[in-house]
Amino acid sequence: MSIRSAASSEREEGRPSRQINIVLRSHDAPAVGGTSALSEPVPAKSAAHAGLFQEIGRELDALVGLDNIKELVFEIYALLQVAQMRSEAGLASGGQAYHMVFKGNPGTGKTTVARIVAKLFQRMGVLSKGHLIEVERADLVGEYIGHTAQKTRDLVKKALGGILFIDEAYSLARGGEKDFGKEAIDTLVKAMEDHRSQFVLILAGYSSEIDYFLMSNPGLPSRFPIQVEFPDYSIDQLLQIAELMAKERDYILMPQAVVKLKQRLLQEKDESLHAFSNARYVRNAIEKAVRSQAVRLLNQYEHASPGRQELMTLRTEDFKL
Ligand SMILES: Nc1ncnc2c1ncn2[C@@H]1O[C@H](COP(=O)(O)OP(=O)(O)OP(=O)(O)O)[C@@H](O)[C@H]1O
């Protein structure tokens, strides 16, 4: 079997790619123009991975927007798949570093995508466990000389076989040369050498700050060959995310509630600029509305139970934004 991404075929036709719909084709089908001995498809172990990507593809498709990231994940998948085929054909393969930088504002999906990537690496045999350890400065940096190196090494140890995800990574460089953050960076760089293919490091944070962080550490940029931008979501995308989050929880949003949420999102985006927390803001708004709805229903139905439809409905008054 081989795999092709519908996203790429759409691109060829000049249409924007929206979804990673995986098209499976049989290896047994003759290639265009017939097969020669050299081009003959190899019955491959790698074929087993084909089905695995379908699950990952479904998880990616469930995310609103993020087309560039969906394509990147498919690219990584293709690279791993072809590396496996090359190895089966006796060709050089591997040696690729997968450490990454995820740049973007809060709530743009960085942690969510990191979890999907961890799963992909585990399924493809790059990482043995595929778990994600999410840390920030306080988890890595200690209070006395030597403490930081120990704390950082302990976390790397926990991350072996998976992904170490450092949020707001630039805060490690905050205090300059004399700060313990520097010790954490040095320990991480050493760990990347010592445990070369045993874990993947993802640095995450605001775009400008991450760029500054990488620039101030000349040895770092080349260690992170994959750099991805997570753009802010548009208002329409945020509303789609809201509907999705409500649906996942078995709720529906009344049209007027959507209008109210939209107005609040426009205002919030405008006022908080850099600090606007995108999908995280939406998640908090939905969770708060769910709590308000519960209180409203209890008050409203003192001696009876609300019907199924009423239990599912989030109304304008539930959004106290
Ligand atoms: N494209 C999307 N589609 C659906 N849900 C999304 C999308 N992006 C993010 N979410 C949801 O929004 C919430 C926040 O996302 P996530 O934690 O991945 O963001 P983040 O960029 O890592 O944020 P932070 O930098 O604040 O940690 C999660 O509940 C996640 O499932």
Image (spheres, rainbow, N blue to C red):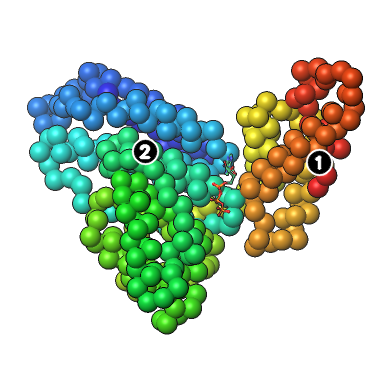
Q: Quadrant of residue 84?
A: top left
> Which disc is residue 319 wearing?
1
Label whose residue precedes the other's in the sequence (2 or 1): 2
Front residue of 209 and 266: 209
Q: Marks 2 and 1, Cα distance to the nearest angstrom?
A: 37 Å
Q: Which residue is mark 2?
A: 120
Q: Quadrant of residue 306?
A: top right
| Residue 279 percent coordinates (x, y) | 63, 46
Label pair 2/1, CB-CB below 8 angstroms: no
| Residue 134 percent coordinates (x, y) | 46, 52
Q: Residue at x 44, y 40 (%)?
A: 116
Q: Residue at x 70, y 40 (%)?
A: 287
Q: How many callouts does the rendering have?
A: 2
Amino acid at pointer 1: Phe
| Residue 21 percent coordinates (x, y) | 45, 29
Q: From the viewer's perspective, tell me whether residue 15 is left or right of residue 278.
A: left
Badge nearest the viewer, 2 or 1: 1
Amino acid at pointer 2: Leu
Q: Residue at x 62, y 29 (%)?
A: 248
Mark 1 neighbour class, 10 Å CA radius: few under 14, some 14 to 19, many 20 or more: many
Q: Quadrant of residue 150?
A: bottom left
Front residue of 168 and 220: 168
Q: From the viewer's perspective, tell me whether residue 118 is left or right of residue 298.
A: left
